[in-house]
Image (spheres, rainbow, N blue to C red):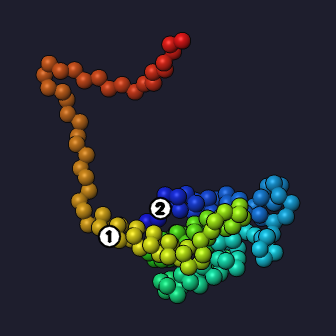
Amino acid sequence: MKVPPKARNFWWRVIKGFIPCHAVLKGRHIEKVGFCHECGREETIKYLLFECTWAKNFWHDIKVATSVKMPSLHPTAWAIDLIDSNKIEPKVASVILCGGWAVWSERNTRKHGECTRSVAESVKWTIYIAMDLAITGQRSSNTCPKVRAKWRPPVVGVSRLNVDAIFKNCIR
């Protein structure tokens, strides 16, 4: 996937169910209530990313700006379906993954009382990141891959020593 490493890591956590939303935290007995503080519905990962009020506004604006439409998602395998190139086009998946990361980031900044971006600013950021990575990927796929030099024995009269070790400074 052509997404930033943080978004890739985020999506791995989504797939594994490691996103600390209220329903997940309640399931782990960390929080007593598993509901969204903004709208009162159960805050699952899917709900948080796609169905919450802020997220719905965000995805509506993404659709208007890019014509990227959210595919119909399987109730349990939705996170994996979004990265499956047989089910969704990679460029669309990049926008959705970057968008999910933006929704999560904004949710956290709102929850912690920090300065937040508007929906429009988050949409612009998502489009910029996804399109920039798509353009960069096109350019890099046209270049020749680097060929790694093969190992050659040293010239006569020279010794070569390969070492894999750690040296700890034990001076007191």
Find residue 138 and name its label: 1
The C terminus, quarter of image = top right
| Image: 83 above or below 69 | above
Task: Say few, some or many: other residues with alpha carbon within 10 Å of mark 1 (under 14 / 14 to 19 / 20 or more).
Answer: few
Along the line of sight, the residue nearer the viewer: 56 or 112: 112
Categorize mark 2 by other alpha carbons within 10 Å: few (<14), some (14-19), many (20+): some
Q: Secondary structure at mark 1?
A: helix
Could you tell me which residue is drawn at 51 percent across and 15 percent down? Answer: 170
Which numbered dot is residue 4? 2
* Sequence-earlier tag: 2 or 1: 2
Q: Quadrant of the N terminus?
A: bottom left
Left or right: 7 in relation to 161: right
Q: How many marks?
A: 2
In the image, is residue 144 above or below residue 39? above
Q: Is residue 16 left or right of residue 164?
A: right
Residue 95's place in the image compared with 34, above or below, is below
Picture residue at 73% right of the left edge, 69% below the top: 44
Relative image position of residue 108 (x, y in whole percent): 67, 63
Residue 41 lies in quadrant: bottom right
Distance CA(mark 2)–CA(mark 1): 16 Å
| Residue 136 horizontal/vertical position (percent) | 35, 67
Classify mark 2: helix, strand or loop: loop
x%, y% of residue 126? 50, 72
Label at residue 97: none
Is there any visible trace of residue 37 in the rendered image? yes
Q: Amino acid type of disc 1?
A: Gln
User: Which circle, 2 or 1, is nearer the viewer?
Assistant: 2
